[in-house]
Image (cartoon, helix red, strand yellow):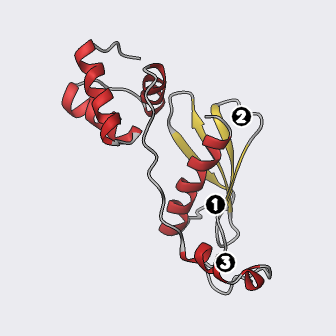
Amino acid sequence: MAKLTPEQITKVSAWVAEGATLSQIQERLSSQLGVSMTYMDVRFLVDDLNLALIEKEEPKQPEVAAAEAAPEEAAAPAAPTAQGAGVVTVEVDTIAQPHAMVSGHVTFSDGEKADWYIDHQGRPGMAARTPGYRPTPQDITDFQVKLDAALRQAGY
């Protein structure tokens, strides 16, 4: 990890106070300060500086709001009627794969499964169990949100 000057640390602290995400901080370090860091190094930097990222409240998804409005209807599981009608689920392995810092599995809304990992340099990767399978853009977005939540819950 790169050693930052006190001025650079002050800038990082200001970015965190403004509500910047780790990705935004990583981008600004590179573009504004010429410091190249992996996503995980930025995460460790923020942690080492005892800075708290500002959590942005996520808007309620329509299906969650509908479930709260009609709990008796939500009790019956909805059968997927079209591609994308299911739910993306993410699992974190209790023991990571040998090449990874953390790994797990994802089931996309159409029932297809893939193995995901984050390697020791902080680079993400995914391998679909069905050769050539590509998840929908909405499934990728759902996967990213659920992966973030799963990793936070697991303490990463």
Query: Residue 22: horizontal and vertical position, in percent?
Result: 40, 38
Q: Residue at x 22, y 25 (%)?
A: 34
Q: Residue at x 54, y 71 (%)?
A: 61
Lower position in the chain sequence, tag 1 or tag 2: 2
- Calculate the distance from the C-alpha at mark 1 to the C-alpha at mark 3: 36 Å
Compared across the picture, whether 102 is left or right of 39 comes to right
- Calculate the distance from the C-alpha at mark 3 to the C-alpha at mark 2: 35 Å
Query: Residue 15: horizontal and vertical position, in percent?
Result: 29, 35
Q: Which residue is drawn at 41% across and 17% down?
A: 1
Which secondary structure lies at badge 1? loop
The type of residue carrying mark 1 is: Pro
Question: Label 3: which residue?
Answer: 67
The label on residue 131 is: 1
Residue at the extreme left of the image, as rendered: 32
The label on residue 80 is: none
Q: Which of marks 1 and 2 is in front?
A: 2
The type of residue carrying mark 2 is: Ala
